[in-house]
Amino acid sequence: MRAKVGIFLRRHRRRALPLMAAMALAMPLVVGWHWAKLGWRDWHHNYPAVPNGYTQIVNRFGQPCSTAARAVYMYWRAADTGTTYSVRFHRKLGGYPTQMVSGKGGVSTNLDNDVYGHIQNNHLSQYVKHGIYGYACRYVRGGTSWSTHAFGIAVDLSSAEEYMGKTYSTTNYRFAQIFQNHGWKWGLSFNDPMHFQYATGY
Amino acid sequence: MKRTLAILLGLLGTVGISIGLLAAVGRTDPAPRDFGPPIGPRMTPDTGWGELLIVVVGGIYPTRAEAEAANDAMPFGDMSGYYVVPVAQFQGFDQGIGSPGDFALVCAFRTEQGALDFVALAQSFEYPATILPGRVRSLGGLYVGLGQEANPDGTGPLTHPVPESLP
């Protein structure tokens, strides 16, 4: 097959090169058109610095279970069951008005526009499965320390499939890199593949 | 010459064994951990002794062992979920559901909003969650997860009684 392609390119060098150049030029335009059609673009507007450890979390996001921790909401539909979840999160992680998001009192475009938009545009929403939530005023399991969910800086996706204690991922790995590219830490490193949090150091 | 060769071979062997060991350890999966490490100061368990609380029930079981097993089967990710408590821990509980001697999966709240939020969380996991129709009086005893609801004034967790929870 490779040989045939090579022969074809040698024979039609004059035609093939401009064709390849045109394709290279057209590809970004097609992607741009695709995004524009959906009315979305990646803003990266006003992201807070990722806190490291409890003290920085409190300094940057305030007390757990505060009004700010649950100020912004978005809807997220599970691809497998069709259930639509209302996900609440901190006002510093979204809610800023964009082409896709109506202003919800938030100050950045992180989660609801940029992360969610990338997942949609890369056609990865089909891998987000049921069991989706964000803010919850809860302690960590088996303890009395606050969970990152209580600060509104954590989301769990596909929680039934990507259950806690699982040392590998079967669906969230498809979009985990998008979260990581936007400052989120993936819980797979501590065997919690459903979990994404906007904090490190614990 | 032989001595130098022996030293070199020894060094090479040591390096080789070290690399082999590191590769073997690197391939091993991380040890499973039940929950994430604590991220800050621990809150003092608050039993709400004498207060009138709203209780969300996840199930009633005749023995503690059965209740614990059911609770283990209902994880809430890295977050705390239900607590196993004797039904007799609450005055008024047994009149509505269960009987003295039974054990229940519960989470108790001071505000209706806290209870509703927890029900929504449980439902997102597709776990049973029923709010008892009336407030019940806490007789103290085992910790039931109070404080895991937002303070109505928006300043943080609710760690003190509110007018509705006072008898």
Image (tube, grey):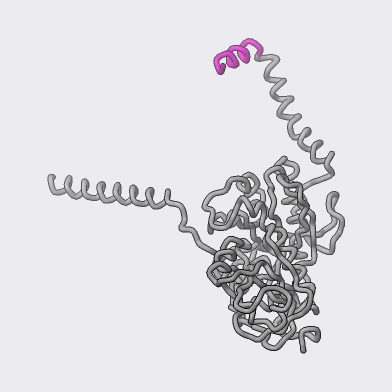
| Residue B85 visible in the current orientation | yes
Q: Quadrant of residue A87?
A: bottom right
Judge whether residue A8 is colored magenta.
yes
Locate residue B166 relative to residue B2 in the image: left or right: right
Locate residue B15 relative to residue A144 in the image: left or right: left
Residue at x-position 74% and y-position 77%: B54
| Residue A119 visible in the current orientation | no
Residue at x-position 34% and y-position 49%: B19
- Check the image and name the residue furthest to the left: B2
Q: Quadrant of residue A4?
A: top right
**Magenta stretch mostly in which secondary structure?**
helix
Q: Position of residue B57 (x, y in %)?
A: 69, 70
Residue closest to the eye, A100 or B157: B157
- What span is in magenta? A1-12
Q: Position of residue A163 (x, y in %)?
A: 59, 55
Residue A149 versus residue B45 in the image, above or below: above
Residue closest to the eye, B87 or B16: B87
